[in-house]
């Protein structure tokens, strides 16, 4: 490269004199690659400078590279002016050159040149944007006026093209000029944060979905990245509701129930305001009912509950909806649903024992204001206190048929009902209690008049020799001093062979003959059976005051004698007859 001598050409006049003497094609030759010449042309003859740029681009030789390196490192050179012309030419490699040239003076210079190139560029596809170039743009756009200052429509479109090619994701929309910001928002090239959403929506309040849906591009971005949107709101304002009106909730569910996962839909519903609760659940797709029900975002009308239960029954979502801690929901608009439908709803609620406590089931059914309660036969005995609570609430008829039905569920299904019933004694029959006689007699919760009725009519209520019912009857009768016929005492003794169910009765009955007493005691088995085996038979006197009293009674009549069996062996009984 032939370079003029700086000592003789250091002034503008000298350069001008030189340019007057050069051939016409001078600016398209290597001779023009001189710092002072190009600097002069950039300031005084832009057209000639463009010719030099064209030569550099078309013949990017070692001489050209050496010139560019020298020019970019010259402290007083109009570096940005040259870059502007190179970008406008356009030189395809200019952004790679700026990003990757190792001999760039410093990072500040690199960024100034990048900014100049962007401001004077053609569309981005006119350049070879290498990974290094794209990375530089993506990492430094906040420091470039090409991005931060408002630009013309045409220039904004070109800067936006570079942002797209560089995969720019804007962390703070405040860093952009307004025209570019609008394009970035429309292209969804920004992070979902509350501040960015406020800028995108031109609001200064919480960017709820009510606001978001007013902007189609913002709504599209949020609904396709709903989890990121939810996270953004939670991070900025953890307690904020992301949706505040019923109209928005309804529209969001209708639009998104097929696109969002169940978890995403439930998360949006959970973050909505209670005031957004749906008045009519049938306004949204059936498939989304469980989510609003479980999320408590439907007004608790009987019509809504009826509609849901008709489709899904009383499921986990209903259970979550109707129960709130230790209380249950207050149903509204009872009369809007006819009697038959309310009865059908009550039956399904009352039978949901796997999901709801009996107190909640009965409380909800009572709210339905049923004109004639519920037929017990429609309910499923489940071993809980539903029957008793239904009787107390006058929801189930206090009659034999109700007891007979719930008795099929065993003692646990009726025990509390025997306690609260006002009528059970009127229809107390052996058939009604045959499956749990022992439990009934032993239960301290059951009124004594009911238990006593059973024991006093033992032959009727326990026609067969069943061990536990007879044992319970014997013990209860002895505790309550109920006198049983000797034939029933004998049956208890023979069947149970349990002294605790028999001896107290014998002690109290002073009218028994010795033969009757021995007959009954012998039915208890050993050792009492020895009394019937004739004279001379001996056995140890059983412990207990009742045994002592009875043996002494027989001794007085000459049937036995009580003797000492030796030191430490206690007393014995010997038959005398």
Image (cartoon, helix red, strand yellow):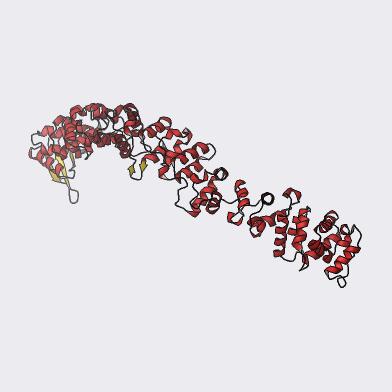
Q: Position of residue 151 (x, y in %)?
A: 66, 53
Taking depth in this image into account, of 347 and 95 the one nearest to the observer is: 95
- Taking 568 as reference, is 491 above or below it? above
Taking depth in this image into account, of 571 and 28 the one nearest to the observer is: 28
Q: Position of residue 485 (x, y in %)?
A: 13, 31
* Residue 206 seen: yes
Taking depth in this image into account, of 145 and 448 the one nearest to the observer is: 145
For residue 567, side relative to residue 49 (left or right) = left
Q: Position of residue 86 (x, y in %)?
A: 78, 56
Q: Split into 4 quadrants, where in the image is the C terminus?
A: top left
In which quadrant of the rendered view does residue 29 lie?
bottom right
Q: Position of residue 417 (x, y in %)?
A: 25, 35
Q: How many marks?
A: 0
**Identity of the residue furthest to the bottom in this view:** 7
For residue 538, side relative to residue 77 (left or right) = left
- Taking 228 as reference, is 48 above or below it? below
- Taking 504 as reference, is 407 above or below it? above
- Name the residue: 60% across, 51% down: 190
Q: Split into 4 quadrants, where in the image is the N terminus?
A: bottom right
* Residue 380 seen: no
In which quadrant of the rendered view does residue 279 lie?
top left
């Amino acid at each position: 490269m032939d370079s003029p001598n700086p000592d003789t050409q250091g002034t503008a006049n000298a350069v001008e004199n030189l340019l007057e003497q050069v051939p016409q094609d001078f600016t398209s030759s290597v001779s023009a690659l001189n710092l002072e010449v190009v600097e002069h042309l950039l300031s005084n003859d832009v057209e000639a400078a463009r010719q030099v740029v064209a030569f550099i681009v078309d013949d990017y030789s070692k001489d050209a590279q050496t010139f560019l390196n020298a020019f970019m490192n010259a402290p007083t050179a109009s570096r940005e002016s040259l870059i502007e012309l190179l970008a406008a030419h356009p030189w395809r490699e200019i952004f790679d050159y700026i990003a990757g040239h190792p001999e760039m003076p410093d990072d500040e210079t690199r960024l100034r040149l990048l900014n100049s190139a962007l401001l004077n560029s053609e569309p981005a596809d006119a350049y070879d944007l290498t990974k290094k170039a794209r990375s530089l743009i993506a990492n430094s756009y906040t420091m470039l006026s090409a991005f931060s200052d408002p630009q013309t429509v045409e220039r904004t479109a070109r800067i936006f093209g570079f942002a797209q090619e560089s995969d720019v994701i804007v962390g703070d929309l405040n860093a952009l000029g307004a025209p570019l910001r609008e394009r970035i928002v429309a292209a969804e090239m920004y992070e979902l944060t509350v501040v960015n959403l406020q800028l995108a929506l031109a609001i200064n309040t919480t960017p709820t979905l009510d606001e978001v849906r007013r902007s189609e591009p913002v709504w599209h971005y949020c609904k396709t990245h709903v989890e990121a949107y939810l996270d953004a709101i939670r991070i900025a304002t953890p307690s904020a509701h992301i949706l505040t009106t019923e109209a928005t909730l309804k529209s969001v569910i209708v639009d998104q129930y097929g696109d969002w996962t169940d978890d995403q839909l439930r998360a949006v519903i959970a973050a909505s305001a209670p005031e957004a609760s749906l008045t009519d659940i049938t306004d949204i797709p059936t498939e989304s009912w469980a989510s609003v029900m479980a999320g408590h975002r439907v007004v608790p009308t009987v019509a809504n509950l009826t509609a849901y239960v008709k489709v899904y029954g009383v499921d986990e979502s209903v259970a979550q909806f109707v129960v709130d801690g230790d209380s249950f929901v207050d149903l509204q608009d009872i009369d809007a649903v006819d009697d038959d439908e309310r009865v059908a709803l009550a039956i399904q609620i009352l039978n949901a024992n796997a999901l709801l406590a009996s107190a909640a089931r009965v409380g909800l059914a009572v709210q339905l204001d049923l004109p004639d309660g519920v037929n017990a036969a429609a309910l499923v005995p489940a071993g809980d206190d539903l029957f008793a609570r239904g009787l107390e609430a006058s929801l189930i008829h206090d009659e034999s048929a109700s007891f007979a039905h719930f008795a099929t569920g065993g003692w646990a299904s009726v025990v509390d009902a025997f306690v609260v019933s006002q009528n059970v004694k009127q229809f107390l029959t052996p058939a009604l209690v045959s499956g749990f006689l022992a439990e009934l007699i032993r239960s301290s919760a059951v009124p004594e008049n009911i238990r006593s009725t059973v024991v006093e009519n033992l032959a009727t209520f326990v026609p067969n020799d069943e061990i536990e019912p007879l044992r319970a009857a014997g013990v209860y009768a002895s505790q309550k001093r109920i006198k049983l016929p000797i034939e029933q005492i004998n049956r208890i003794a023979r069947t149970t062979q349990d002294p605790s169910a028999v001896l107290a009765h014998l002690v109290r009955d002073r009218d028994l003959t010795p033969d009757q007493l021995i007959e009954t005691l012998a039915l208890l088995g050993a050792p009492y059976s020895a009394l019937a085996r004739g004279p001379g038979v001996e056995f140890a006197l059983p412990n207990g005051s009742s045994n002592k009293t009875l043996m002494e009674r027989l001794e007085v009549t000459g049937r036995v004698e009580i003797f000492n069996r030796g030191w430490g062996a206690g007393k014995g009984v010997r038959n005398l007859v």
